[in-house]
Image (tube, rainbow, N blue to C red):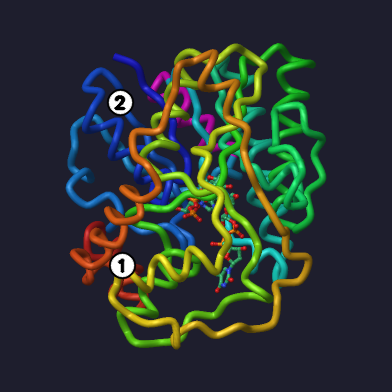
Amino acid sequence: MKTILVTGGAGFIGANFVRMILSERKNIKVVNLDALTYAGNLENLSGFMENKNHDFVHGDIRSHELVEKLLKEHKIDGIINFAAESHVDRSISSPGIFIDTNISGALNLLQCAKELGVKRFLQVSTDEVYGSLSPDEDKFSEETSMKPNSPYSASKAAADHLVRAFQHTYHIDTVITRCSNNYGPYQFPEKMIPLCINNIRNGKQIPVYGDGMQIRDWLYVYDHCTAIMQVFEKGESGEVYNIGGNNEKTNLALVKTLLKLLGKDESLIKFIKDRPGHDRRYAIDNSKITNSLGWKPSVTFEQGIARTVDWYLKNKAWLDHVTSGEYQKYYEKMYK
Ligand code: NAD
Ligand code: DAU
């Protein structure tokens, strides 16, 4: 039996990851450390809170005492760090918390991992550390230099530098993954896809920033999770792996796809003021992870987006609890 510390496992990708591991890997125990910020939601883990291989711990990755205690008590074999402030727009209005969580939090985890000899540390990073591409530029490879443009991506880039420095200086075994935009179940509806689905179902307008011709490279969240696990188990020490599924779409095309799937017309589209410093295009060259680890996505974009729309329509209560704030009472109901 292996025990891993997953941080941020009540958020969108972390919860999908925890659900995948507990469903598919009976020989892995998950200690799930999450501070339950506005983005953390225990309803994302429904059906798994009582699982015997799952220990949920409400706490902060910045607490040295707590992380040290968890590593010792559970004899943690590896750490996978999902915990972060993750929304670009929030980083533009309030950058400070992004520095605290994404940089100081990662530093604390690395220091604890070093002190207690954790065997492997995986940092879940993002393609946004590379900056922005013009329409005809080559996709991001692992060799592309970092040029982060938002306080969010700058904080993620700083964490990546710390991970690299800990490997180089203290010989800690680390790997970094840099994925493109995720979509799928349990995504907080401040992000583009669930926001669109929620607005469309309520007959509300869809706010499209600027001209809507920015490009994002979309990956179904389950496929991000399988890639992370493959890198954690088989990735070469000290390496970075880009993750993406070759699905570049303009925001406008994406919105039109969602309107069509939900049977609504384009009159709901509303162009609004652009995001300051808005990155124009992200695109991932995934040849390293596909060639060296044999990873590939399990679904096409068309399959993944249809499945996602279906999930939100079938889980209206989840969406209603998030939009009403009810989800934040779940912890109290369960534990107090
Ligand atoms: P999210 O915002 O949905 O979840 C973040 C989770 O971290 C929440 O549960 C929150 O409560 C927790 N958290 C925040 N601060 C914490 C702290 N100090 N201590 C403990 N827990 C804390 O984010 P997400 O979209 O699931 O992203 C997860 C990771 O993946 C992030 O590191 C993000 O940078 C990265 N990433 C996201 C995407 C994407 O498209 N969403 C793509 C590539 C990489
Ligand atoms: O590329 C990976 C990154 O993808 C992750 O590291 C981030 O954590 C994640 O939030 C995401 O960042 P984006 O800024 O690309 O995602 P977001 O869903 O906020 O926006 C997607 C695109 O849609 C982007 O070009 C901005 C645009 N947009 C977004 C919102 C919320 C709109 O046009 N209108 C909106 O209301």
Residue located beneath label 2 in the image = 29
In which quadrant will I find the N terminus? Answer: top left
Can residue 261 be seen?
Answer: yes
Residue closest to the eye, 24 or 145: 145
Res 336 label = none
What secondary structure do most residues of the magenta stretch adopt? Answer: helix
Q: Is residue 287 magenta?
A: no
The quarter of the displayed image where residue 142 is located: top right
**Residue under the image location 29 percent in, 56 percent down:** 306
Say which of marks 2 and 1 sits in front: 1
Disc with the residue nearer the chain's start (2 vs 1): 2
Give left or right: position of 101 versus 5: right
Can residue 103 be seen?
Answer: no
The part of the chain drawn in magenta is: 64-75
Amino acid beneath label 1: Leu
The quarter of the displayed image where residue 52 is located: top left
Give left or right: position of 224 versus 200: right
Residue located beneath label 1 in the image = 261
Residue 70 % position (x, y): 45, 31
Give left or right: position of 126 versus 222: right
Residue 76 % position (x, y): 43, 21
